[in-house]
Image (cartoon, rainbow, N blue to C red):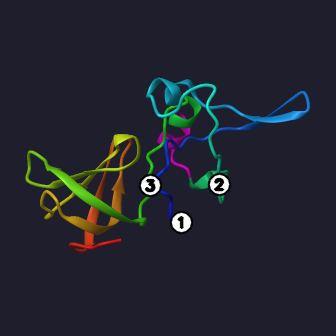
Amino acid sequence: MEISEKLLCLFNGEVSVKDDEYVVTVPKSEVDAGSIDPGEVYRVALIARDGEEERTDEERERSAAGEPQPPVEEGEIRYVEVEDIGKQGDGIARVERGYVIIVPGADIGERVKVEITEVKSNFAVGEVLDEDVTE
């Protein structure tokens, strides 16, 4: 699934019924992070889960606590621009909400196509599939 670079936030939520409306509640943490502002109008996309059993215990806990989910998934292909070099010499790219993708072997200023190979709550690792790409 390809997700737009315009994505402001990504979270799990329930659709509830209030009077004659269906309501999706946005976690307070998303507003506190500055991604969105109360009173503004946004486009909303709802993505069905294939099954609850696919979620890890960590994902279930973060979701229950209202914590934002990583904006990438293992196996996802992304085009990223390396903005910095980490302490160990790996390229650093940032995507939605400043989420970090570590890109071993990439240099500052390179725009590369990566496959996400590992996802953690605060960073992911991407393997370079193609160097110096233009989208």
Q: For the residues marked 3 and 1, what is the alpha-carbon distance in whole angstroms?
A: 13 Å
Q: Specify few, some or many for label 1: CA neighbours under 10 Å numbering under 14, 14-19, or 20 or more.
A: few
**Is 108 positioned to the left or the right of 124 in the image?**
left
Residue 44: % across, % down: 65, 46
Q: What element carries label 1?
A: loop
**Is 97 positioned to the left or the right of 45 in the image?**
left
Instruction: Using the image, tell me which numbered label, if any, was put on residue 47.
Output: 2
The furthest residue to the front? 40
The furthest residue to the right? 20
The image shows residue 76, relative to residue 8, as above or below, that is below
Mark 1 and mark 2 in contact? Answer it, CB < 8 Å.
yes
Q: Which span is picked out in magenta? A: 55-61
Mark 3 and mark 1 in contact? Answer it, CB < 8 Å.
no
Q: Name the residue under label 3.
A: 5
Of the residues under marks 1 and 2, which one precedes in the sequence? 1
Q: Name the residue under label 1.
A: 1
* Near-viewer residue (58 or 48): 48
Q: Main secondary structure of the magenta part?
A: helix
